[in-house]
Amino acid sequence: MQDERYLRLLSEKFPNAQAVVTELINLRAILSLPKGTEHFVSDLHGESSAFIHMIKNASGVVRKKVDEVYGLGTMDKGQWTMDKGQGTMGLSEEEKRALCALIYYPDERIELIKKYYQENPPQPSAQGSENQETPPQPSAQRKEEQGEYVDLFRLNSQISNLPTLRDWYVRRLNQVVHIARAVTIKYSRSKVHRLLPNDYAYVIGELLFESSLEQKDRQSYYNAIIEAIIETGCADQLIIAISYLIHSLTIDKLHIVGDIFDRGPGASKILDVLSTIRDYDIQWGNHDIEWMGAMAGNMALLATVLRVSIRYANIETLEEGYGINLLPLASFAMSIYGDDPCSLWQTKDFENNPRLTRSAQLMAKMHKAISIIQFKLEGQTVLRHPEWHMDHRALLDKIDLEKGTITIDGKTYELQDKNLPTIDPANPYALSKYEQDLMDQLWRSFRKSEKMQRHLRMLYEHGSLYLVRNGFLLYHAAIPLNADGSFTEADVCGIRVSGKALMDRTEEIIRRAYYGEGQAKQDALDYLLYLWEGENSPLYNKDKMTTFERYFIDDKDIQHEQKGAYFTLADDEQVCNKILHEFGLNHENGRIVNGHVPVRTIKGETPIRANGKRFVIDGGFSKPYQEKTGIAGYTLIYNSHGIQLVEHESFESREQAILSGSDIHSRTLLQDFSGHRIRIRDTDKGKELLQQFDALEQLLAAYRSGEMAQH
């Protein structure tokens, strides 16, 4: 009866045998296509410029397509050869860079080119020709201008043999179409058409799929389209639309394996870009949970977000990204610490930090003020939840204000900063009225930020604690383990769980913190603080977070944070196999992908662990980590040929990428290609389509046997 009801529902969409046959043909064709390309990145930490460029160049995939279409050789400028196999012409290195720059940043690059031709119009030759054989040269005045980032000499070399803007349009339109063809070849026409802008879908479709015409007519028809595009003034829009199509299809699915926030200034920009991407998911990291808790109203995490932002001089995300007003905090800090130099509270690298938009002294005072508030609010929360067994992390009541010391585990330490006027010895965790008013103002600012609340919804709608997809198990940090390799059993809001059940229960609580109601919602919101710094948190998994000790106590031993057993044991292949089995994956071809711990390549560490069973892809997207890692990030790429692990160098700048095609230089660490092309039928999506295929075959049989009436 259940099958019959399902078939009747299916018949509403496919009312007769012919409709079913058409869909069966379509599904069979889709199942035979190569799988789309998945990209995995982690620990972006607000580095929006590098992330955006990585999206535009698809971690080097676009440049590889350019090399495939236009040859791998490095020819001299202006040298051209016909590649008969491709029907295209080989390009010099400068031309390839120029083409890549156009595909990456089409809007900005077109404006730059138009500006160039406007300022350097073609000069008639001695014979009176309107065109010239060599490209226009920049004027002497333009050569001498200072402060203009447009390097006209570099630009000139990239438009060699293109004397007029029209010539440039003809050349570049042809080139972006050739690259788009190379990218779209493994996708169905219907999928490609769905990604095209309505205004230009027909024209772009004709350019991409005109090969059905006879050879002679094809070239004439194709050339006529190009001429019409230029003559009607639509070339800019077409180049931009085709470039965006290339961006979209070179990354069919994007996986962000945690930590969008903190350190760098552009977390809000990263989320803005993600909102334009067709298919992406996020596995929450500890820094994401920190911000999600703050955005949802956990006051201890709100104070933590402010402290970390100020510590790294990263207030752009708060003020410019989300419109958070920090003036109340500045006023409070000046009123309390006006005569205090707060020398121990200077922001990271404050002397050389170009992002320091306020005076270093004021930032230090703000840093100290919000840190004390954070320690109070953390203490309130952990004391409210004795089941967390974190009472030892409530430290303010262990301070002797008169002596300027603190006693921890029976040992007394001198405080590095003894000026603590806002701490009441009788009730050290209570906020003063002034502090409470400040936090109320800051929370109102968070709550009223439309962009912040929209981004919070994105993080919940596209996020999860872990993901199982196409044989990969993705999570940010850890699956808590005991020293013997067994799964740690922990209390997660009243239920003791371990392994996959711990991850599932934790995700349930994270969602309750946003979608829940009443006391259950408040307890879940509190639990986000445990996830930020708790010993059995799968997002942290250390014995303690020694933020207080690093500020106040000059003793490396007490500042030490002991990592959980996972971070050692997960380098063992058998342990990884056990984890994969726990999540229902085949240990023979399953793989784990996580980030969280930067891979110190300069110390000989490798991102490939456990005999290839686990990939740690935190390679230092964040600039503060690059001194430790020696590189600037990883991308794991899984396409129809297999797996590639790509290592990136530091990104120079967006301006140089627009001007000269400067790119993120990358090298491939691993190519694990299978002997056969991976088809959609081999993927998780393929399994869903095969189930649809079986159901449609049943419906077709019911139609043909007369068991169900056709409409």
Image (spheres, helix red, strand yellow):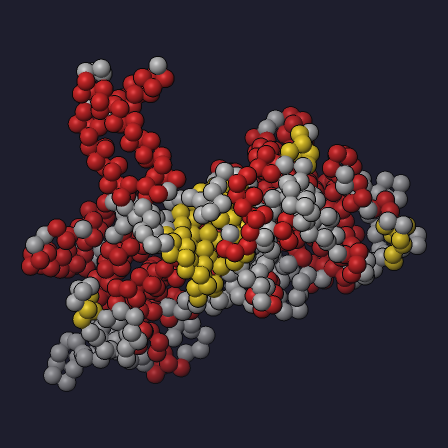
Residue shown at 33% from the left, 17% from the top = 5
Give the side of residue 613 with respect to residue 236, left or right: right
Q: Quadrant of residue 93?
A: bottom left
Q: Nearer the viewer, residue 614 or 602?
A: 614
Q: Residue furthest bottom?
A: 126
Residue shown at 18% from the left, 79% from the top = 132
Residue 668 visible in image: yes
Residue 257 visible in image: no
Give the side of residue 17 with respect to residue 527, left or right: left
Residue shown at 24% from the left, 55% from the top = 181
Give the side of residue 558 with respect to residue 143, left or right: right
Q: Quadrant of residue 100?
A: bottom left
Q: How many marks?
A: 0
Indicate the position of residue 539 as horizontal and vertical percent values.
Answer: 62, 45
Indicate the position of residue 359 as horizontal and vertical percent values.
Answer: 67, 63
Q: Nearer the viewer, residue 394 or 323?
A: 394
Indicate the position of residue 492 as horizontal and vertical percent values.
Answer: 66, 34
Residue shown at 85% from the left, 50% from the top = 408
Give the side of residue 188 with respect to residue 530, left or right: left
Quarter of the figure with the C terminus: top left
Q: Residue furthest right?
A: 402
Indicate the position of residue 510 as horizontal and vertical percent values.
Answer: 59, 36
Quarter of the figure with the N terminus: top left
